[in-house]
Image: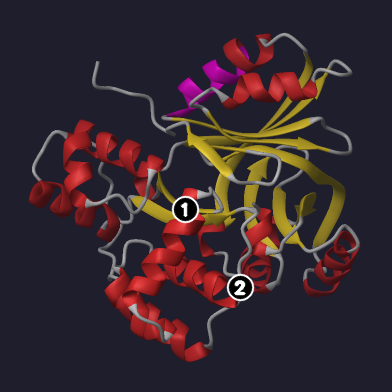
Amino acid sequence: MQETYDELDVAIVDAVRSAPRASWRDLAPVLGVDPATVGRRWSRMHSTGDAWVTVHPAGSATPSCAVVEIDCTPGRSAEVADVLAADVEAATVKLTSGARDILVLAQAPDLDALSAYLLDRVGRVPGIRGVRSHLATRATLEASRWREGALDPEQRRRLHARAKNRLEQQDMGLTAADHRIIRALNIDGRMSFERLADHAGMGPVAVRRRLTRLEEAGLVTFRCDTSRRLSGQAVAAVYFGSIDVRDLEDVEGRIRALQGIRAASLVAGPYNVIIDAWLRSTAEAHDLERKMSHVLPGLRVQDRSVVLRTIKLLGRILDAEGRSLRSVPLLADTTG
């Protein structure tokens, strides 16, 4: 039997997006319901794979990333996508329409490791006949900031007040213990400190202290994702464009204000900006492009693709409806 969701479910998801590890007791007053209701509804959405929380390195711990366009031998794109989805380095894998068959967000600890993955692994997968890589230089808008708009201004204000103040960005790397904590949070971003302690090989108090350090230093970012069925955003589209470097700072702020844009990255390549959007229908693809032309007059959209299916989303293997099936950790296991 297919699950159905209502406005409260969507509001719970938006609340979790704003405070990913807050207790149900803390979120319940903001939502106007009791903690048991929040917990029960989240558990249902999480157990069906319709909503989940994950984490990824950020700040000075951000890995080297590239958006990779892949052309495949006819009839083999789905097979190639499944092969790449098993790779730790392939954080996101999408089957697309248009001038590329597959889009991959590839990442690795540094540029050398990323280059090795693209040259020695991706380029040799059977069924691939062309690869074009665009090195990401900066994230203009992260998907972790996406909201469905289910909360009113007062609810957003109360959740924002819960947010921890970050320390000044610090140039410090991740320790082996940090890696173990992040790998566990890739599986379940709301994992209890007791379970995290088992994964990290240290006590719950020490894990809490290390995770607080990571968050306050801006070394990790939490995000909550949902299936298409829960979000109501049935179509994903990707726009490839160019902006005059003199206009970048102004354009970045305007991109963040455009409804429907989920993420945007500045890249090095024939395009210098790649924009991901979530839409309710394919008809909105050109509507959004028209809005971008008005709000971002300096942006020249040179190509666009509709996502036919997302195979993997930031370390999560998805089914045809965008539900999470299992996790492929974003960090390689360094405990061996």
Tell me what residue is drawn at x 72 percent, y 61 percent. Answer: 233
For disc 1, the neighbor class at 10 Å (few under 14, some 14 to 19, many from 20) is some
Tell me what residue is drawn at x 62 percent, y 22 percent. Answer: 84
Q: In the rendered image, which residue does mark 2 sit on?
A: 6
Residue in the foreground of this view, choosing between 272 and 281 = 281
Q: In the rendered image, which residue does mark 1 sit on?
A: 46
Q: Is residue 115 on the magenta stretch?
A: yes
Query: For numbered disc 2, what is the local secondary structure?
Result: loop
Q: Of helix, strand and loop, which mostly describes the magenta segment? A: helix
- Position of residue 103 in the picture relative to residue 299 (left or right): left
| Rendered location of residue 45, percent (x, y) | 51, 57
Residue in the foreground of this view, choosing between 89 and 171 = 89
Taking 88 as reference, is 122 above or below it?
A: above
Taking 106 as reference, is 124 above or below it?
A: above
For disc 2, the neighbor class at 10 Å (few under 14, some 14 to 19, many from 20) is few
Taking 117 as reference, is 188 above or below it?
A: below
Residue in the foreground of this view, choosing between 14 and 170 = 14
Residue in the foreground of this view, choosing between 100 and 155 = 155
CA gap between label 1 and label 2 equals 15 Å
Q: Tell me if I can see residue 201 in this picture.
A: yes
Tell me what residue is drawn at x 29 percent, y 68 percent. Answer: 23
How is the model colour-coded?
Answer: secondary structure
Query: For numbered disc 1, what is the local secondary structure?
Result: helix
Q: Amino acid at mark 2?
A: Asp
- Position of residue 252 in the picture relative to residue 187 (left or right): right
